[in-house]
Image (cartoon, grey):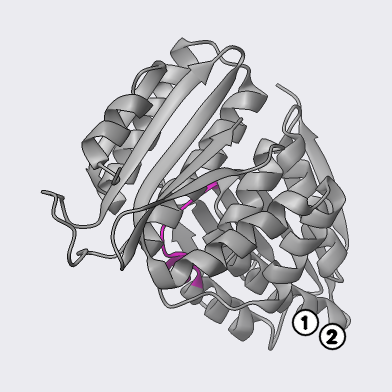
């Protein structure tokens, strides 16, 4: 499986999906008008990865901003990870937020309450 | 007295305005406005929490315009750009006000009014539940909208959504939405 590496732009996050290391990373801003175009290949990649995942998958989500269009796509990403977790493979989602950003912490908690995968809330102190 | 875009816009732009725009709402315009506002808020030394809230509210309200504005408005006798919308950001004391304006088909008024009234009637926790329910149960439209924008705006701003529908003609109303952050 080829890894996915995408540089960030002002409206889309940087992406690292690496099968060999079992590392999934989404960082930056996710505010495109239509997020499906951007996230569809990522969700497809995870579906393929889910067929033979590593024993442990580490997921790092470090978003500065995301819009509501992205929020559904991020949920789709998490649902794929939930399926991997359900098939008895370790998955941990680390949700990073800046120390004063209660909205971002709350957004992480929203996902945590919907998705059955262990979440780790990580505060970034400057 | 009938509604007049020019008058409406000049009344809006009277306060401590940071940015005022009327014209086509395009993806590029949204980029430009976000960049400009980010710089201005940094210069104004706004608290970083407030800055993030304003930025979020701005993204959602402009993208709401982007997704919902009709390209052309038949029977509106004003010289309007395609996908016409209005955006004004002003400072009022310690807080900021984001106002958007756009023509809405008369058929959509009832739906919008009910949706906003519903959102305004909810407590913080009820809004959170509504957000989570829509997130988990509603699919994205082909355009990428998900019915979450207004709920998110209400959550992030922590204030009620102020709105007004001005009758323009039999087919159109002008929809004004003001969000205090």
Q: Residue at x 25, y 41 (%)?
A: B5
Distance between the Cα atoms at labels 1 and 2?
6 Å
Q: Is residue A31 magenta?
A: yes
The percent position of residue A83, horizontal first and vertical second, equals: 77, 82
Q: Tell me the quadrant of the picture where the C terminus of chain A can be found.
A: top right
Judged from the image, the secondary structure of the residue bearing numbered disc 2 is loop
Judged from the image, the secondary structure of the residue bearing numbered disc 1 is helix
Please state the extent of the stretch shown in magenta in the rendering.
Answer: A28-39
Q: Residue at x 30, y 45 (%)?
A: B3
Q: Residue at x 70, y 45 (%)?
A: B155
Question: How crowded is the residue under tag 1: few (<14 C-alpha within 10 Å), some, or many (20+)?
Answer: some
The answer to whether any part of residue B29 appears in the image is yes
> Is A6 displayed left or right of B152 in the figure?
left
The percent position of residue B129, horizontal first and vertical second, equals: 82, 61
The residue indicated by pointer 2 is A87
The residue indicated by pointer 1 is A83
Q: Which of A60 and B168 is in front in this view?
A: B168
Q: Nearer the viewer, residue B30 or A51?
A: B30
Q: Chain letter for mark 1, please.
A: A
Q: Which residue is drawn at 79% across and 76% down?
A: A82
């Amino acid at each position: 499986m080829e890894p996915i590496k995408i540089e960030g732009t002002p409206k889309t996050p940087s992406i690292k999906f690496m099968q060999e290391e079992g590392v999934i990373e989404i960082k930056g801003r996710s505010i495109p008008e239509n997020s499906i175009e951007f996230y569809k290949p990522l969700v497809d990649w995870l579906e393929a990865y889910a067929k033979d995942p590593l024993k442990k998958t580490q997921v790092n989500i470090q978003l500065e901003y995301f819009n509501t269009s992205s929020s559904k796509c991020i949920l789709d990403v998490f649902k794929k990870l939930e399926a991997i977790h359900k098939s008895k493979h370790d998955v941990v989602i680390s949700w990073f937020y800046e120390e004063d950003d209660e909205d971002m912490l709350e957004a992480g908690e929203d996902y945590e309450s919907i998705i059955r995968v262990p979440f780790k809330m990580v505060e970034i102190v400057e | 007295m009938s509604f007049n875009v020019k008058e409406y816009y000049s009344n809006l732009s009277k306060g401590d305005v940071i940015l005022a725009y009327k014209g086509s709402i395009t993806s590029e315009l949204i980029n430009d406005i976000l960049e400009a506002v980010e710089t201005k808020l940094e210069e104004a030394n706004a608290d970083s929490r407030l800055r993030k809230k304003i930025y979020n509210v701005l993204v959602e309200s402009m993208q709401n315009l982007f997704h919902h504005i009709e390209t052309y408005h038949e029977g509106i006798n004003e010289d309007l750009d395609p996908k016409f919308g209005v955006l004004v950001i002003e400072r009022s004391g310690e807080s900021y006000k984001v106002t958007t304006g756009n023509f809405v088909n008369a058929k959509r008024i009832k739906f919008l009014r009910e949706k906003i009234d519903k959102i305004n009637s909810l407590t913080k926790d009820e809004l959170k539940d509504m957000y989570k329910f829509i997130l988990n149960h509603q699919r994205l439209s082909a355009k990428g909208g998900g019915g979450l924008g207004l709920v998110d705006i209400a959550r992030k701003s922590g204030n009620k959504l102020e709105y007004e529908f001005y009758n323009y003609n039999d087919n159109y109303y002008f929809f004004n939405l003001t969000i205090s952050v």
